[in-house]
Amino acid sequence: MRLLRLATLTIVSLVSADANVTHESRNILPSTFKPAQHFRNVNLVRNINLEKSYARETINVVVENVDAQPQSEYFLPFEQSSLGRIGGLEVKDKKDPEKAGFLVDVVEVDPYGYGIEGCADIMTQTDDDSSSTQYYKITFPSALPSKEQLTLSITYYTLSALSPLPAQIAQTDKQYVLHAFSAYAPSAYTTSKQKTKLKLPGVDVPDATTLPAELNADGKEDPQKQGTTYTYGPYNELPAGAVQEVSVRYEFTKPLLHATLLERDIEVSHWGSNIALEERHWFHNRAATLKNHFSRVTYQQSAYYNPPTPALKEMRFPLTIGSMDPYFVDEIGNVSTSRFRSNIREANLELKLRYPMFGGWNYSFKVGWNNDLKGFVRRTKGASDQYVLKVPFFEGPKQAEGVEYERVVTRVILPEGAKNIHFETTVPLVSNATGLHPTFMDTIGRTTLTLTAINMVDEFRDRDLIVTYEYPFAARFRKPLVIFAGLLAVFAVSWVVGNLDVSIGRKQKAT
């Protein structure tokens, strides 16, 4: 037990150390922390969209300040086991969605209440003392006055939210997935009235947890069904932290595409007037695994009528208009089963994998292409040495079933000598760093901006990344001067070596 507690504390401390680098305002609170009941949820509607391979949740809630003083900090609770799978959390004013989103920070609750300095004291803690709830802290742009109301729109995504059930199926069987959730929305405050709506991809739903009519405010048995929409509620007043576990099992005969890592390089060249983009993907299909061995004959037969399948066969990359010179390479080498279509209206890269990716299978590859620099970089007015780069933060495949990304690392490789780097993006980041990346014939290396995001989904694929930087006129001639100096050095060394006397023996004097 003591070793287990020490190991647990080590994990918590490592996460905290990493998070302090990325979230400067992140706090570590004791396990007894409970948000002050400054607010009351007057009306809450929770929408869970399950049409893709991940869950997208939107909570629209009318919040009222019931405290005597203005308040600006609203807490959203999550179970500790699920917090690491939550991503893309954004909060906006429902009545004014065009405004910038509210500030959101992770507030970490130390499960033992002592912090790192109290290592010696955790030996006396019991399992009942630990906290399983963590919080996101939402900060309003201005404090909400007493008795006033604000309508929040909270959106977030949950990765690995669907579990195949059964876990193994035959090669041509339908796939069913299970999604477990609470019929009551997560809340740290009392909620006067609420309901939860599910949007499913189809009507084939063999199992859905039913709740008795006495829980429902309208006296109806939950869930109420209308096409592909299932509704739990409405429910009358519920206390903070109320939970009612339910689940739904439905057909989803599509891949559950999960990327453990996406690395994206954006290399800017002013001399070549070119921007080179490359993405390296590591994919895993979380779909149900095959009950028996893979049959090539069955797979070839299904190609003629193309039935729904949890196997991933091909991917489609919509690229920026004007993209050129694409390539598709995996660990074996170049994959020739790709098709690129480009015209004045579109640029699509269609990839057919080297082999179909069934449940439990992995596939890693890289794709790359080039673009004209003029479409992405412009010079700012009034500053001849300052430039603005505008590119998508990441692109990746666009699939009907959706794609979830555990980690996305984007590197912007600027010309050597670029300085005063600044960036803007609406993608929630966990870290950013500026360094040097040595390439061919560089002196010190190219200036590189590295940005990292976690728990992303393909709905973020077209979010812009705007980078401003200075590229002095003198820095543009650094590489040509280095090449020129290198050639002079080669000629000088050749001349010196050519005039060396390496003969053996004494020279004879002429008579």
Image (spheres, helix red, strand yellow):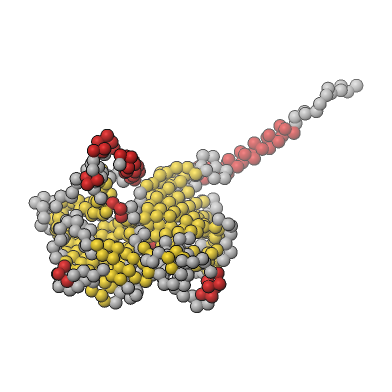
Name the residue nearer the viewer: 227 or 381: 227
Residue shown at the point (75%, 29%) measured from the top left: 500
In the rendered picture of this protein, how many numbered marks are placed on residues?
0
487 on left or right of 503? left
Name the residue nearer the viewer: 410 or 137: 137
326 on left or right of 220? right
- Residue 91: % across, % down: 26, 57
Residue 244 lies, with reference to residue 31, above or below; the image says below
- Residue 149: % across, % down: 15, 59
Residue shown at the point (80%, 28%) measured from the top left: 503
- Residue 295: % across, % down: 53, 69
Quadrant of residue 360 within the rendered picture? bottom left
Residue shown at the point (22%, 62%) measured from the top left: 244
Q: Quadrant of the N terminus?
A: top left
Name the residue nearer the viewer: 108 or 72: 108
Q: Residue extending furthest left? A: 68
Name the residue nearer the viewer: 234 or 291: 291
Residue shown at the point (50%, 57%) measured from the top left: 364
Q: Quadrant of the C terminus?
A: top right
Q: Is residue 156 visible?
A: yes
Residue 440 lies, with reference to residue 85, above or below; the image says above
Q: Residue extending furthest right? A: 511
Residue 205 lies, with reference to residue 130, above or below; the image says below
- Residue 407: % across, % down: 40, 53
